[in-house]
Amino acid sequence: MVDGGKFLVQLLRCAIGFIAGVVCCGLFLAWGFFTGGQEPQDAGVFALVIGSGLVSASVVGASVFVPALVLVALAEVAAIRSFVYHLGAGGLLAFALWSIGDVEGVQSGADLSLRPGTAIALAAGFLGGFVYWLLAGRLSGCWKTVKDDPASR
């Protein structure tokens, strides 16, 4: 059985969680790229970080939307609320997106090592997966109701 009200609320949570996770991922990448791990001294640099973070979030979100939709649907149907699942899913999506761009390494076939920046991409994916879990993943499958069987009383 499905509780329609809880289902709609969970769909809203999933959408907000996905958007927040992607924005967090984009801001993490932009912060590291523009500041190099130091506090920005200029307000213009901070505005640049925020602006480019939002742009990169839209690119990342568009790139991982369909695979993330499949992983979220799997988590919802199977009621997977595991922190590890959502963190791993975010990391897997980030690693896949990062690895897809390495066309030269695939064509040459000589070097099977990871691309530079793989750890940063994985960290961004893990962070996005954590934010999604925090907002929506903890409650995966909450819209399912157990059929009340009078014989089991």
Image (spheres, rainbow, N blue to C red):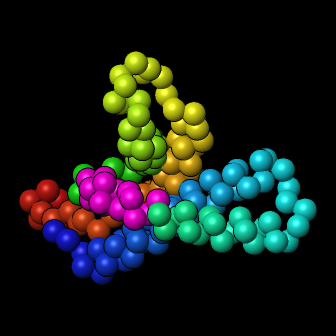
For the view shown, which residue lies furthest in the right direction? 41
In terms of image quadrants, where is residue 106? top left
**Residue, far bottom:** 5
Q: Is residue 90 visible?
A: yes
Q: Residue at x 35, y 22 (%)?
A: 109
Q: Is residue 136 visible?
A: no
Would you identify the image quadrant in which residue 79 lies?
bottom left
Q: Is residue 29 left or right of residue 151?
A: right
Based on the picture, tell me whether residue 70 belongs to the magenta stretch: yes
The residue located at (40%, 71%) in the rendering is 15
Position of the C terminus, as image quadrant, is: bottom left
Residue occupying the point 31% across, 78% down = 8
In this picture, residue 153 sits left or right of residue 28: left
Residue 51's place in the image compared with 93, above or below, is below
**Which residue range is magenta in the image?**
60-74
Question: In the visual, does 66 lie left or right of 152?
Answer: right
Quarter assignment of residue 123: top right
